[in-house]
Image (cartoon, helix red, strand yellow):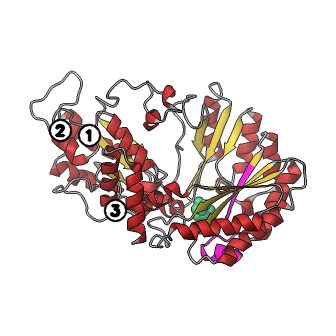
Amino acid sequence: MLYSPDMDNPRKAKLFSYAGPSLKGFDAVFFSVSFELDYINLIKMLMISSIPPLCNERQQDSRRPGAVVITGGIAVTANPEIISAFSDIVFIGDMEENLEKILYILVQKIFVTGRKIPGRTHKNDIPMSYRLFEELSAVDGVYIAGNSGNAGKTSAPKRSILKDIAQPAHSVVLTGGTEFSNMFLIEIVRGCRGTCLFCATRCATGPVRQVRKKVVLSIIAKARPETGRVGLIGPVLTDNDELVEIVEAINDMGFRAAFSSLRADEYSDTLAGLLVKNRQNTVTFAPETGSFRLRKKIGKNLTDEDLLKAVSLSVEHGIKNIRFYIMYGLPGEKIEDIKATADLVKRTAGLLKKPGCTLHLSVNPFVPKKGTPFGAWKVSPESYYINMREILTCELKGTERVSLKFDPLRNFYIHSLLSIGTRETGLKLYNCLIKKSLKSFGRYAREVLLE
Ligand code: SF4
């Protein structure tokens, strides 16, 4: 049976069948969070399961002992506080190496000496005790902040960084009922060589570590009988020096691939050819802004020339759709920067000479991220973003072969507060979700950010 926070979404509800508590009997539940808005889903998932969302509630609930909630991932590593009231263990960094240590301590202290072994009952239930927290806190990457009066560290712990990715993360369940329907996802690089100052991924994922081609290919070969679709995952795929060889092999194996991101200044004629051979119709780049001045200020050292060359190569090879990720509301932004974006878009549109080619602009307001140099940047009132949107729309009016899509501002303040907020922010979100009123959390976020 599948369970999802989307169950109350009428469009998706039919995919799921909800028949009562779903996580009952699980000893531990792990969440990996890459995107801050998923904290909403995480709390909702706990709410619809049998596990009380708050650590304090769980430890008081003697009827359901042993449900330990462990959270990690990029968003959590960048800001461990938000989720701290809900996580018995917040994990900061790469968990692989320390996972065994954590499980060993949990199994010894809770599940073996406690009463969680099936078929065995113990009179002396061992709660998440002071000693247990003390032992867990000694493991690199473990941050225990969910419990008052425990031995957990109150300052952020040493981040755990894996030297090599010998065993990349990959799909273990293939199903048609998820966002990446029946696609086998595999990580080919962790960390990023980029220098973008706004980016939480760069700050949270550590140095670049490539997964060797041999390892990637041996894993996806096993998935081939199950699916013809493979998704390559990494902050920037071109940071894997063997990307071209990996794509060549994927093509030979008859996979249709999806590429999470490519860097325009590392794009090549060979790669464009391989993408077309793989029947890719769209290629995505992230210039962030058309203003070179602003791009440099935010640490994105991409030149207009590199970007335009990457677009030309794609079009020459027959790729029809070019997608740009653009941000506005960036620190130090001026009206001239928005006009520079319009100018770069027009120059790019001029390269789309082949019939059917379109430049798709996905335009999002800048969201400050904790742990980055711009983490303390104060967001602006809505009127600023509306004004900048109007200027960009007006500047691009009548430009052919361009489609412009603004991300709605609806979730902007929620996303910003969940990126830079505190433990109180997480608790406030929970209270609003209990009242089924995400809107009131939105109002709260706006007030806090603009005060
Ligand atoms: S290239 Fe992308 S992932 Fe890397 S630092 Fe810049 S924005 Fe972040």
Residue 213 % position (x, y): 65, 45
Could you give the CA–CA distance between mark 2 and mark 1, rounded to whole angstroms? 8 Å
- Asked whether the viewer can see residue 159, the reply is no
In the image, the residue with mark 1 has its CB under 8 Å from the nearest atom of ligand 1 = no
**To which residue does mark 2 refer?**
61
Look at the numbered disc 1 and give the secondary structure of its residue: loop
Disc 3 crowd rating (10 Å Cα; few below 14, some 14-19, many 20+) is: some
**Which residue occupies 29% across, 65% down?**
155
**To which residue does mark 1 refer?**
52
Disc 2 crowd rating (10 Å Cα; few below 14, some 14-19, many 20+) is: some
**To which residue does mark 3 refer?**
422
Mark positioned earlier in the residue sequence (3 or 2): 2
Q: Are marks 2 and 1 in contact (CB under 8 Å)?
A: yes
Range of the magenta residues? Answer: 283-301
Q: Residue 80, located in which quarter of the rendered image?
A: bottom left
**Which residue occupies 82% across, 48% down?**
319
Residue 60 % position (x, y): 16, 42
Residue 373 % position (x, y): 49, 73
Frontmost residue, 192 versus 295: 295
> Quick one: which residue is furthest to the left in this view?
123
- Three-letter amino acid code at disc 1? Pro
